[in-house]
Image (cartoon, rainbow, N blue to C red):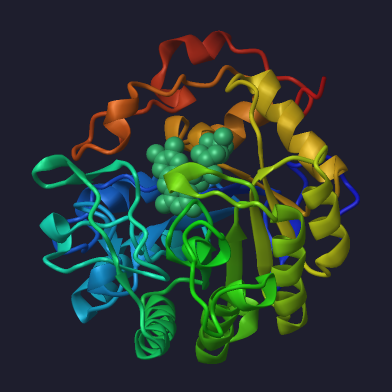
Amino acid sequence: MTQTTDFLAPARLGRLALPHHLVMAPLTRNRAAADGTPTDLMVTHYTQRTTAGLIIGEASTPNAVGQTYPNITAIHTDRHLAGWRRVTEAVREGGGRMFLQLQHGGRVSHPETTGLTPVAPSPVPLQETIFTPRGHLPAVVPREMTVADIRATVADFAAAARRAVDAGFEGVEVHSANGHLLHQFLAGNTNRRTDGYGGPVERRVRFTAEVTEAVADAIGADRVGVRISPGNTVNGIEEDDTDVLYPALVARLRDLDLAYLHLVHADPDTAVYRRIRADWPGVLIGNPVLPDLTTAGVTRAAAGMLAAGADLVALGRPFLANPDLVTRLRLGAPLNPVRDRYLMYTGGATGYTDYPALDDQPSSASMVALDGPRVA
Ligand SMILES: Cc1cc2nc3c(=O)[nH]c(=O)nc-3n(C[C@H](O)[C@H](O)[C@H](O)COP(=O)(O)O)c2cc1C
């Protein structure tokens, strides 16, 4: 386990040597073609960010019904594979390393987008609107998955993982966070099942465990990470037993020898963080809560994450707005602010590939280099 709080020191992730401890968190940006195939713009975006220690590529759907929103990336056809290969080749050429996140939206999906009725552990609709090609529409009641659906979905994740590795990714991240299908199985308000996949925590963690095991069997456990977000209420999730749910999940996953476990909103002051860190024997990636997006704020949060026992630090918005984030943190240089939120999910280069690097900014000549990161 890492002892350093110097997040710019070299690190390891299994067989991968990383230049430092900073990981680019998965960031959905809706810049894929209508069928989910990565575009030239995406090649540019990821190539700009190859100095991340590891890039976790944005949520990519493993089957048609799992698609959340329009222009989300996918990885279930050969066309998707070929599109992603262009991204991974460019990232590798730029000296980077990349995993791909596999995400099934479950009830966070809409027939207007997929032409299909969304599926979920139980027929409990999201009490929110969902973005579709016709704008924001009320969510529909999802169809309860049968055991045959569950088995087929597990197989789809495994097939998507194989495609991801064929496309040149170093591995995949199973998305069991942020209110998507796997999280819907974990949480009591979205999982009302009475069969072997619902009820007590040991049964609610089963679907995430089976997906992860199947993916690990398909591509090797050392190429598989899992992302979780204990207590996160996004997408209508309500957990009333976070403190026992996640230890039960970790107990199912801990002996698989996975590449890593990735924690969203990792807060060292919470009991669930401390319990997961104590129980998880492998690499823990912490995605810290960022009080602000300044150089000092990000530096403090990243160092604090390592001090709290995380092995690597994942950052989302800082990488979104700063293609050269690592250089900026190394120099103590100011960070670009995140531009309008609506640009996050619209197509096009604006707010995506046009964030400047220091070299693009005339004022960088007067920037004073500091000795390593500023840790307050
Ligand atoms: C534009 C945007 C897109 C995101 N897409 C994903 C995603 O595809 N998968 C995921 O697990 N989290 C996603 N997230 C969450 C981020 O990975 C990260 O957990 C969150 O932004 C908090 O980290 P930060 O404070 O460093 O930005 C997204 C966040 C943003 C802002």
Q: Residue 130 vs residue 272: left or right?
A: left
- Between 365 and 285, the one lying in front of the other is 285
Tell me where residue 199 sits by quadrant: bottom right
> Which residue does the image show at 19% across and 52% down from the upper left?
70
Which percent across, then down, holds residue 324? Answer: 51, 34
Q: Residue 236 vs residue 131: left or right?
A: right
- Between 246 and 339, the one lying in front of the other is 246
> Which residue does the image show at 71% across and 28% down from the upper left?
299
In the depicted structure, whether residue 109 falls above or below residue 116 = above
Q: Please count the marks in the image.
A: 0
In the depicted structure, whether residue 61 falls above or below residue 96 = below
Which percent across, then down, holds residue 208? Answer: 56, 74
Q: Residue 123 vs residue 77: left or right?
A: right
- Between 355 and 197, the one lying in front of the other is 197
Q: Quadrant of the N terminus?
A: bottom right
Which percent across, then down, holds residue 109? Answer: 27, 57
Q: Residue furthest front?
A: 194
Q: Residue furthest left?
A: 134
Q: Quadrant of the C terminus?
A: top right
Task: Say if residue 95 shows up in the picture.
Answer: no
Q: Residue 376 vs residue 131: left or right?
A: right
Tell me where residue 328 sits by quadrant: top right
Which percent across, then down, holds residue 107? Answer: 33, 60
> Which residue does the image show at 27% across and 62% down from the upper left?
67
Task: Say if residue 216 shows up in the picture.
Answer: yes
Tell me where residue 250 sits by quadrant: bottom right
> Which residue does the image show at 38% across and 66% down from the upper left?
104
